[in-house]
Image: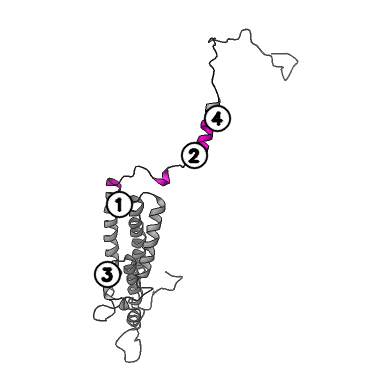
Amino acid sequence: FWFTNMAFGDGASILIFFMWLIILFMTSYSTGLFFGIFPAGMADVTLAQAAMAVLVVIFILFSGFAIQPDVIPDWYIWAYWLNPVSWVFRGLAVNEFDSGAYDEPAAPGSSLTLGEQILVTYGFTDSNDDPYQYIWAGYAVFFLIGISFIAMIITVICYTHIRFSTGKGAVLEIDEEAEEAQAKVGDSQTVSPIPFKCVDLTFRDMHYTVKSSISKESL
């Protein structure tokens, strides 16, 4: 927060820092729960990693960073609103530029502040083309809480009702040639039983001597 020169002072309160911290914490927490669905519901690690990689690409494309939200066509704008990364990005942007540190006019005679103008420039506007208000930072937190709750339920359902008889990641592949070679060696070795009588071995009159270190006596 401090190294990136985020808003602090000059009109921004310390609450901006705590909101920033809460958003990042919920991002980490909800992401861990959400991606925990894949290993719970898929047969092996390779398939789960591939699915998660594809989903990460989709999250980035529809986050509002690569493509501004105000230019996303209506027929797939739903992907933007269902994307948790877009809520995080919007929440952090509003938390920064609507913090009070950018309240000077964007231009002489402009009705928008500098922070609001930045939000408008990057497409963070509502249906009336007005910049998002600070309450959208709170909406981002509530959305992440909802995602975490839903992901937790889905993960529990997967662990409870989905079972895989074999898992590729948990099974060691055995070389068939090595098995055949071992079988041939086993067949070539003939075991002939040798009769023997069980006996008990005992030892009598066992003793040993130790030479004393202070005399020449044997103990």
| Residue 56: mark in rendering | none
**Amino acid at the residue labelled 2:** Glu
Instruction: Write down the residue under mark 1.
Output: 155
- From which residue to which does the magenta span run? 158-186
> Earlier along the polypeptide chain: callout 3 or callout 2?
3
Residue 210: give x, y in percent of width and height. 69, 16
Residue 58: give x, y in percent of width and height. 36, 66
> Earlier along the polypeptide chain: callout 3 or callout 1?
3
**Label pair 3/4, CB-CB below 8 angstroms:** no
**Label pair 2/1, CB-CB below 8 angstroms:** no
What is the distance, in whole Å, between disc 3 and disc 4 at their CAs? 65 Å
Q: Secondary structure at mark 4?
A: helix
**Amino acid at the residue labelled 3:** Trp
Front-most of residues 17 and 125: 125
- Image position of 40 (left or right of 207): left
Which mark is nearer the camera, 3 or 1? Answer: 3
Quadrant of the image occupied by residue 105:
bottom left
> Earlier along the polypeptide chain: callout 1 or callout 4?
1
Which mark is nearer the camera, 3 or 2? Answer: 2
Residue visible at 55% across and 14% down? 194
| Residue 176: mark in rendering | 2
Q: Counting other residues with Cα less than 10 Å from the Cα at mark 1, is it few (<14), some (14-19), or many (20 or more)?
A: some
Residue visible at 38% across and 59% down? 52
Q: Secondary structure at mark 1?
A: helix
